[in-house]
Amino acid sequence: MGQKIRANSVLPAVREELTLETADGLRLVANLAVPEDRAPVATIICLHPLPTHGGMMDSQVFRKAAFRLPALAGVAVLRYNSRGTWSEQGTSEGTFDNGVGERFDVAAAIEYAEFHDLPDVWLVGWSFGTDVTLMHGLDPVVRGAVLLSPPLRYSQPEHLAAWADDGRPLTALVPELDDYLRPDEARERFAAVPQAEVVPIEGGKHLWVGNAERALDEIVARVAPDVARPLPREWDGPMTTADTSAYNAHNLAAYKDVAVPGPAQRSADQG
């Protein structure tokens, strides 16, 4: 009988610390995790939440993706700290640029994936990372995108129009109790993109605490549809345990994005 996969469980993978170099001359801290015993079937590039409020490559859903998906789904996971972003793995050069200069960051990650022949590249953005995805993600290498808790704060209607014209798959995973954009409003906003799929996450909140497994299942359903789901919750093989205490304390204290509130949040604020 296998061991239960817990929040800090680390399954086997080949993991490599990287430095990504941007076209405007910055060096970014990054990490790649690929399956240990086979070629990856797909690749996700993780675009993290708002760094000015604690978002980073080790934010919990992306950390768990790197811990689990290479072994459970055969998916390669490329994460990076965008310009000026800190995590315990290091601090990337530069300063936060409100989603503008970050175009060079995501381009550097995509270029790395292309140069190293990583297959079927998808972007997975979370909160601020969804805006960066919508603004700068339509690279020829990218197959499509999955958006977690999209606030639609920095991205503009013209970015949605560009995805609509392009036609590539776009999925928005929208928590039912999100602070900024909830499912009904998300359906209205993403109606501008005919191919966009809006998936409500019942009982979910912006930070995905308690719902990481659901997020990973939904991501794998899009990027590696031949993989059985739900993903296993137990593992019959070697497994180590990561010390995530520093990440958890940092994240829970800090990384809720500041965004223009939607109607639900405005009502709560007024109440």
Image (tube, helix red, strand yellow):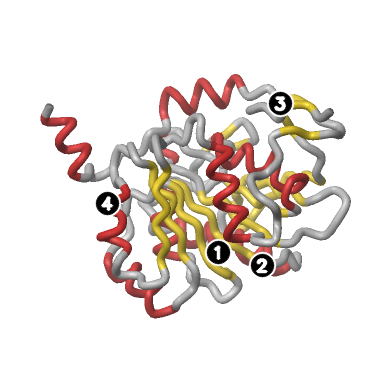
Above or below, 254 relative to 112 = above
Q: CA distance from mark 2 to mark 4?
A: 31 Å
Q: Earlier in the sequence, mark 2 or mark 4?
A: 2
Amino acid type for the residue under numbered disc 3: Ala
Q: Earlier in the sequence, mark 1 or mark 4?
A: 1
**Left or right: where 230 falls relative to 139:** right
**Secondary structure of residue under mark 3:** loop
Tag in front: 1 or 2: 2
Q: Which residue is mark 4?
A: 184
Quadrant of image for the N terminus: top right
Amino acid type for the residue under numbered disc 4: Asp
Above or below, 175 relative to 195 = above
Q: Position of residue 87 (x, y in %)?
A: 57, 34
Amino acid type for the residue under numbered disc 1: Ala
Q: Earlier in the sequence, mark 1 or mark 2?
A: 1
Amino acid type for the residue under numbered disc 2: Asp
Q: Which residue is mark 3?
A: 242
Label 4 packing within 10 angstroms: few (<14), some (14-19), many (20+)? few
Label 1 packing within 10 angstroms: few (<14), some (14-19), many (20+)? some
Q: CA distance from mark 3 to mark 1?
A: 30 Å
Q: Count every numbered label the image shows and give the total.
A: 4
Tag in front: 3 or 4: 4
**Left or right: where 40 falls relative to 174:** right
| Residue 107: mark | 1
Q: Earlier in the sequence, mark 3 or mark 4?
A: 4
Q: Which residue is mark 2?
A: 120
